[in-house]
Amino acid sequence: MFKIIFSSKRSKARIGRLKTPSGEVETPVFLPIATFGNVRGISFEALKKIGYQMILANTYHLYLRPGIEVIKKFKGLKNFSGWDGPILTDSGGFQIFSLKKTKIFDEGVEFYDEIEGKRHQFSPEKSIEIQLELKSDVLMVLDCFFGWPYQKKEIERAVSLTTFWAQRSKKFFEKKVKGKKRPLIFGIIQGGIYKDLREKSLKELLEIGFDGYALGGFGVGESERKMFKVIDFLTSKMPLEKPRYLMGIGWPDQILKAIKKGIDIFDCVIPTRHARHGQLFLSSQKFGWKTINILNSKYKKDKRPPDPKCSCFLCQNFSRAFLHHLFKVKDPFGIFLATFHNLHFYFQFLEKIKKAIKSGRL
């Protein structure tokens, strides 16, 4: 299921192999976001050409559109979308709790779909049931959290509900899933910036028992310094033999810091969302990076490739001037090229980190 194949002697960083029903994935790994079953701005063929093996799909959005009944007719998201590699699905918790008019009960949550104007209810069991219908390879339990600023009493309640829902999720999962080639199920550690509550959440989830453990509720407004203090504290107490997933945190320097603290899995909208707005990631010395906005007028006649050090399809074939032109005339090919480049940058960034781990330089 998960095997560590190399551990750094200079940090908590490690290289592992995550075995899923749809294939193995080497970690540390970054998962492109396929909100509605596809990664916006790029094809699955292009993703595979870059080297990506696994994507993240969104339970909440797929539940609303096209609806689980549609996906059931295709016997899963892979047949519906055409992606044949491993898929991790989130529980829908982040989207639900970021909506207005969400009501939290012991039984689950009730939320308002602002697009269709309807109210829906999610229980821990329903979230798992939807993910099983999607034929996900890695399922996430429904969790509870609050955005910053928050009170400790709020986070105490979130931890209690997360544990209660995790117990129900695991029980429902075991009832529904039989056989050796089963999907994996991850618990989500909550507790905000409070180390005692994070430790409590971890301990309770370990007692339930999951295939992996995610760190949720970060990146909601707390300082980065506080976030990494808690991450460092948690990873020193998490089991070595289980994969660790930091949810939704994805600037390159954050990924590097988190890997050095023992994190294995990442996801974030940053590379694809920034690409759609003309923001390109460029490499610099060692693990450095910067961004440029290709919409700036100074690139109108720039003959240079977007990143002279990059080997991606965009940088090997096109100039900054041409990409600037595509964005100005709103040609979708520009978004494809920028998305390809940014995801290529992220993939190569992690490859560089893995080489540094193996050589003892990290």
Image (cartoon, helix red, strand yellow):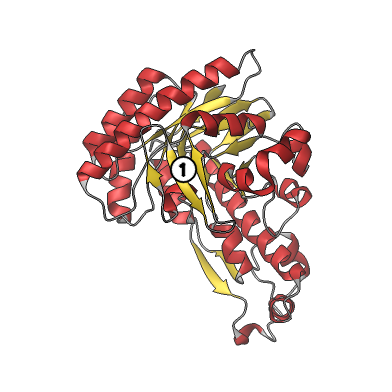
Please state which of residues 215 and 50 is positioned toward the viewer in this rendering.
215
Q: In which quarter of the image is the C terminus?
A: top left
Residue reaching furthest to the front: 118
**Horizontal and vertical percent position of residue 293:** 57, 75
Q: In which quarter of the image is the N terminus?
A: top right
Q: Note whether residue 291 is visible.
A: yes
**Horizontal and vertical percent position of residue 113:** 53, 53
Dividing the picture into quadrants, the one containing residue 208 is top left
Quick check: 21 above or below 10? Answer: above
Quick check: 100 above or below 357? Answer: below
Quick check: 134 above or below 102? Answer: above
- Left or right of 105 in this view: 119: right
Residue that mark 1 sits on: 93
- Left or right of 75 in this view: 107: left
Q: Note whether residue 135 is visible.
A: no
Dot 1: within a 10 Å radius of its alpha carbon, few (fewer than 14), some, or many (20 or more) residues? many
**Horizontal and vertical percent position of residue 268:** 52, 51
Determine whether the residue tagged by mark 1 lies in a helix, strand or loop: helix
Dividing the picture into quadrants, the one containing residue 173 is top right
The residue under the point 31% across, 35% down is 159
**Horizontal and vertical percent position of residue 137:** 63, 30
Please state which of residues 19 and 71 is positioned toward the viewer in this rendering.
71
Residue reaching furthest to the top: 179
Q: Which amino acid does label 1 sit on?
A: Gly
- Left or right of 215 in this view: 43: right
The residue under the point 62% across, 60% down is 342
